Image (spheres, grey):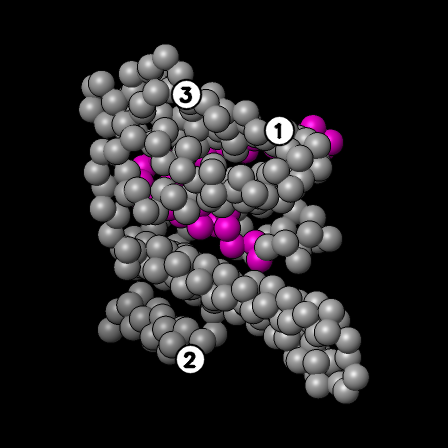
Amino acid sequence: RWQIKKTYEEPMHRLAKATAKVAQGDFSVYVPPLHTVDKLDYLDVMILDFNTMVEELGSIETLKTDFFSNVSHEMKTPIAVIKNYAELLQMEGLPGEQKKEYARNIEAAAEKLSGLISNILRLNRLENQRIVPEVEPYDVCRQLCDCILQFEEAWEEKEIILETRLEDCAMVEADESLLELVWNNLLSNAVKFTPPGGSITVEQTSKDGLVSVSVSDTGCGMEPESIRHIFDKFYQADGSRSREGNGLGLALVKRVLELLDGGIQVFSEPGKGSTFLVTLPAAGADGGKAGAGRGL
């Protein structure tokens, strides 16, 4: 009886107490195993698995807390802008042109807030797998051209030279609507962070059952530390550019590509620009045949 009590009952009571603490939100709990590593039994294994579970839950809780903290911070800025300019608009004797400027600032802040909420909802649905990709073969070169043309006004305004090197047709197995998010985010970032008079290159190739698409810019580039975190939620490599985004675009890109069995790599050097390389499964044995070439 004493042996049973020491070997099973007391450890199980400790484990039960620890479980109760975890249920109340305490993720600092640790239950020591009964034996050394070379003499573990099934109860030790269960205790070690419990400790691992608690550690993971603690990490998730930290991420969740940071996420909500960041969301709150990101929302406060456009809301404050809207509030301030709305108050200014109520001032008497404002010139008509000044009223228009304040109204434009309110509209821009509202668009930023709307974009933030949309991205949060999209990311939440993607991460919780509430979106089931509708994978089918289609021509990614056609889609790339359509997406590039959406940014024509933006790149012309900054006098950016845009060069494309695309095949006539490259069929991929993917969800067309989800993949559009990827191209729009990468192109948007390239236009934002390329200085006036700079250049952007979009290149697509097919090889060994894979279709690759790279988006390169001549922007400021990134440090290695920034590259390591570039796909983290709310991470912005350059704090001075926080007004130009909310740090969710590349997190969305990565999650979409994970769902579609694709991949993404980043190559960048400070002062030399950045390249984002996306790879996707080609559609069938003939999906990656190159044509004579397509350009804009």
Going by the image, does 57 lie left or right of 157?
left
Q: Residue at x 29, y 30 (%)?
A: 139
Image location (x, y in percent) of residue 118: 44, 62
Q: Amino acid at mark 1?
A: Ile
Q: CA distance from mark 3 to mark 1?
A: 17 Å
Q: Which residue is mark 1?
A: 161
- In the rendered image, which quarter is residue 106 located in? bottom right
**Which comes sooner in the sequence, label 3 or label 2?**
2
- Segment tinted magenta in the rendering: 246-275
**What residue is rendered at 64% in x and 66% in y?**
104
Mark 3 is on which residue type?
Arg
Q: Position of residue 286 (x, y in %)?
A: 22, 18
Q: Kindly tell me whether residue 58 is visible in this rendering.
A: no
Q: Which residue is mark 2?
A: 24
Residue at the image position 31 percent from the left and 24 percent from the top: 170
Q: Which residue is mark 3?
A: 294
